[in-house]
Image: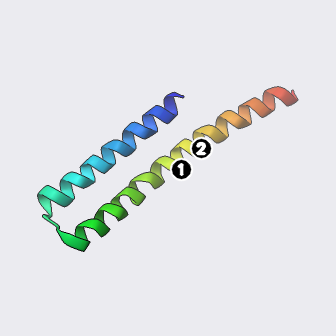
Amino acid sequence: MFAFIASVGIVFGFIQLANYLINDKLHLTGWMKTLSQFIAVILSLYPIKFAFSSVVYKINNDLNTRNIG
């Protein structure tokens, strides 16, 4: 449960950072802003997806070894 909450927090932080960069530093508008935001959301989800899935895999693997042995 902690890993999921931490993952959501990290994704939210990445999205806020991307929003700051797109709006305040790069001053993008129009379709470039929309495309950049879409790409930023997708890119911020992938690292957390891999990290959270590895945690779930380890937990599942531990539970399976306890049930077998």
Side of 56 where 19 appears, left or right: left
Query: What x and y, as percent, mark residue 3?
Result: 51, 33
In the depicted view, which residue is nearer to us: 10 or 27? 27
Foreground of the two, 43 or 23: 23
- Identified at 19% across, 56% down, the residue is 21
- Residue 28: image quadrant is bottom left
Number of numbered discs present?
2
Q: Is residue 67 above or below residue 29?
A: above
Query: How was this image coloured?
Result: rainbow
| Circle 2 residue | 54
Point out residue 52 in the picture as x, y percentages from the top left corner: 54, 42
Residue drawn at (37%, 56%), measured in percent from left and top?
41
Pointers 1 and 2 in contact (C-beta within 8 Å): yes
Name which residue type carries label 2.
Answer: Ser
Looking at the image, residue 9 sits to the left or right of residue 24; the answer is right
Q: Residues within 10 Å of mark 1 (few under 14, many from 20)?
A: few
Q: Which mark is residue 50?
A: 1
